Image (cartoon, helix red, strand yellow):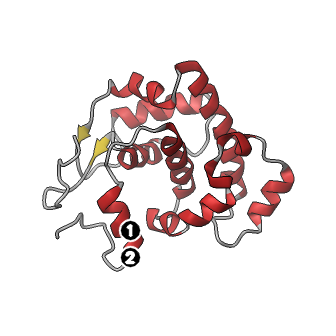
């Protein structure tokens, strides 16, 4: 089976992610939230690094329970900073708490985070390869930053949109090219 060139064929987690998640539309708010947190931890790192620690992140961050994360104390932040199984970056951990509160505000304002995303996407899937940003990621990133989110630059948001299936970037040679959409 031919996969996208970036997929490390020696890493079963990466293969599974490529084959079963990446660019596959999943607009469940719990998934949208988890992926936004994980993508923000990717800033300056490889996605493979984050993906390899995904289960550890789930455990450390209370299975991405937004209500719990919104209430994290300084003591919990210190606990996370000592957890060698996750990416221990204080700015990203604090951003996760902050972004969680904003995510909830967006859910309350629009009924769901996906409804918010649709105001930018019109519910359409974009097919494009070999890009790291576009007008959609630029506009969404600016709005999230205006609302106070951190680690949501256009490149991170573009990667996020690929992860959740708004942007399908499977390469033409890949067996998943244009399968989902």
| Disc 2 and disc 1 in contact, CB within 8 angstroms | yes
Near mark 1 (Cα within 10 A), the count class, few <14, some 14-19 or many ≥20, is many
Q: Is residue 141 above or below residue 78?
A: above
Number of marks drawn: 2
Picture quadrant of residue 47 = bottom left
Picture quadrant of residue 181 = top left
Residue 53, numbered circle = none
**Image side of residue 2 versus residue 116, left or right:** left
Q: Is residue 78 above or below residue 85?
A: above
Query: Where does label 2 land, which residue?
Result: 11
Query: Where does label 1 land, which residue?
Result: 14
* Spot occupied by residue 91 in the image (x, y as percentages of width and height): 70, 52
Instruction: Identify the residue at the far left of this view.
Output: 173
* Spot occupied by residue 134 in the image (x, y as percentages of width and height): 33, 38
Q: Is residue 73 above or below residue 60?
A: above
How far apart are the two marked residues, 2 and 1, measured between alpha carbons? 5 Å
Picture quadrant of residue 59 = bottom right
């Amino acid at each position: 089976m031919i996969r996208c060139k970036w997929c490390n064929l020696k890493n079963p987690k990466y293969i599974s992610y490529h084959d079963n998640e990446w660019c596959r539309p999943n607009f469940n708010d719990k998934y949208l939230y988890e992926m936004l947190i994980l993508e923000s931890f990717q800033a300056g790192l490889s996605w493979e690094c984050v993906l390899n620690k995904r289960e550890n992140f789930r455990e450390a961050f209370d299975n991405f329970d937004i209500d719990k994360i919104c209430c994290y104390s300084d003591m919990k932040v210190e606990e996370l900073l000592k957890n060698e199984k996750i990416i221990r970056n204080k700015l990203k951990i604090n951003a996760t708490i902050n972004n969680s509160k904003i995510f909830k505000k967006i859910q309350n304002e629009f009924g769901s985070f996906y409804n918010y995303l649709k105001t930018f996407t019109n519910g359409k899937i974009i097919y494009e390869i070999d890009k790291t940003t576009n007008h959609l990621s630029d506009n969404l990133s600016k709005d999230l930053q205006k609302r106070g989110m951190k680690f949501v630059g256009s490149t991170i948001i573009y990667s996020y949109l690929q992860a959740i299936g708004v942007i399908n970037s499977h390469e033409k040679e890949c067996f998943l090219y244009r399968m989902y959409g």
